[in-house]
Image (cartoon, grey):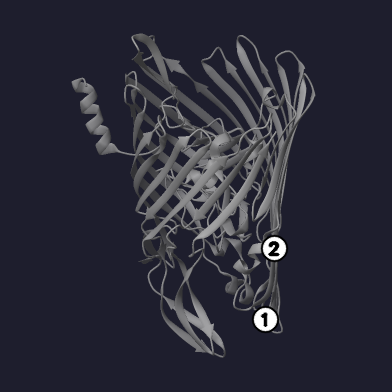
Amino acid sequence: MPQRIFTLLLFSLYAFSYHVCAQQPTDSTDYVNIRGEAGVTIRKNRSPLKTSADGKLRWDLTTIKRLPQILGNADPMRYLQALPSVQTSSEYDAGLHVQGCSAGQNVLMLGEGIVYNPAHLMGIFSTFNTAHFPSMDFEPTTSPAVASRLGGSMQMLLPSLSEMSRLEGDFSLGPLAAQGTMDVPLSSKAALRLSGRQAYFNLLYGHWIQTDDADDTRYGFGDYNVTLQMEPAPGHFLTLNGYYGRDRLKVVGQHDRLPSSLHWENWIGEVSWHHASQRAVWKQALTTQGYTSHLRLHLFDSHLSLPAHIRTYRYKASADLYSRWTVGADAQWHDVLPQSPQVESPYSQLATVQSEQQAWEAAAYALYHYVSPKARFELHPALRFTLFHTPDGHSRYALSPYISAIWHVAPLHSVTLKGGLQHQFLHQAGFTSLGMPTEFWFASTKQQPPQRSCSATLIYKGSTKDEAWGFTAELYWKRLYHQLEYADNVLTLLTDQYSLTEALLQGNGANYGLGLQLTRRLGSVTGWISYSWGRTLRRFSVDGVSSRYPSNYERRHEANLMLSYQPRPRLNFSLTGLVASGTPFTAPESFYLINGYVLSQYGRHNGCRLPLYWRFDAAVDYRLRSRGRVKQSLNFSLYNVFGTNNTVFYRLRFRDETFAYRPVSFLKYPLPSFSYNIKF
């Protein structure tokens, strides 16, 4: 290895960090001699991941069903959490924490539509019906061409017209839900894809969500997708896309101490047009998207109703010009209802009529792509200008510069430095992050300025000569301003007059960390092993006292393993593993029982940590012999193979008129899952 490459490698090891290393993977070949004659042995690249030098990733979702599943569901968001810069705090949390940012600071899209709450079943499953989408794009830093967000971006790509040219079906049956996808070609220039997933959770696993105080708990969810692709004229493509998902949870409890119902739903509607010519690629999209939640809670003699919603109407246009420039415009109108608590009790009636927020934003952006004559150096500067009109009549301006510089130090080795200034005008908060409809959205106002971040990332990516092995190291730093945290809880809503402004704490933060990943792409055993270290620190001022503490989802150390072994063409074994340090929590120092109510006095905020978390999952996928066009496969998965009793959180436990502070575990026993898949 040349001296300068060796020096850069040592520096990158010091700088470390992130992503799956798959530098445009291609099939490799070995030339061998068979009985004196020349022959070629093809070693197929079985990695489903493709990443560029600047960290952008594309995941082929057609192979995701071979990985370990939870109750017959292969969730792409769960597998993204195996990447070094992506973390989650527990099984309850389906959100992605990218480079230390909160889940609400990411943007998640189906096509061009934004999903505001991508979670089912307390965060165990996301809302994405994997079979409907051929691939998924992920970027740890949101591009100025995508949206105004501080975290990362994930986009589920819609199927193309050629991918729906034949009448085909893909159906799966598992213990939790049944799902299916159908491709229906309408003509040589039009095709339709329909997908649906419906849960029958209560038949086999209803006891999972029973609690000590509940007589009966009923839960169900469903997801429905439709995509219509048309080519009305040569080179012109029209897309109609829709999504609807809903959750219904109903609890019949004892002593009126449990919530009676929780409802939440998502929807997306999209009309987009795409035209490609020799000089430019033109795109336009008109979308409507929204999220609605309604919590009804009965606690002792009090009744709480907590509705909230967000609706966004968006028009976006862009053009790729001469393979050098990307320019575009983005206009959005938001209708937001932050949580509006209404309380009825024998002692008082507290009704906070939270007014709906009407806000709009307009943005223009430009990206330039420069590649040196010998393709040794790339430079991609970008700029986004945003005008946001707040609900209280103020206008805010934001200029978001961004730059990415890539140096290809060798054919299979590159170093990337990128960074920029990001802004975010829509915020998410709530008194729990456990995938329940208690998180809500609200817009920036005079009292809540837009969030802002300044970030820098250094990435090294390299591969062996035959591309069988890849290595990635990343170092990131991010400074956060005007961060918000929700300080209220459900008991406060029942006893005090609610004020959104007073319920929010404002402060700053800092995220920094490093990560390593070693990837195997060729042969019968493929996969990766990764390690990440990171800090997500926040500083808030409460009653004039400034306090610095880690965020709720910080994991200082995390190691992930994802392996796939294919000894035969129709047989595949897979194993995933996670070992991580515990997340922070605030522990009470003392309890008081006054008039039947338990009062707690808490210690330092997030001053304690949960125990070490570790879990391994395994799966066996077997494809039956094909009969014509009919392909069948069986998947047997085992979640939490070793039955690790991981503590998720602590709570007060009441029994026989006594109470104690006890750890709570979830899915602490090995959970088998079996699914059947048929394609034709």
Q: Is residue 149 something that shows in the picture? A: yes
User: Residue 663, located in which quarter of the rendered image?
Assistant: bottom left
**Residue 637 appears at what percent x and percent y?**
53, 51
Q: Amino acid at mark 2?
A: Leu
Q: Position of residue 413 (x, y in %)?
A: 32, 24
Residue annotated with mark 1: 254
Q: Residues within 10 Å of mark 1 (few under 14, many from 20)?
A: few
Residue drawn where x is 44% and y is 45% of the image:
82
| Res. 294 in view | no
Quadrant assignment for the C terminus? top right
- Residue 236, image quadrant: top right
Marks 1 and 2, how far apart at CA? 22 Å
Q: What residue is at 60 percent from the left and 10 percent from the top?
A: 279
> Residue 433: x, y in percent?
54, 59
Q: Is residue 658 or residue 466 the one in the foreground?
A: 466
Q: Residue at x 50, y 54 (%)?
A: 638
Q: Earlier in the sequence, mark 1 or mark 2?
A: 2
Q: Is residue 1 left or right of residue 521?
A: left
What's the mark number on residue 67? Answer: none
Mark 2, residue position: 203
Q: In the rendered structure, which amino acid carries the disc numbered 1?
A: Gln
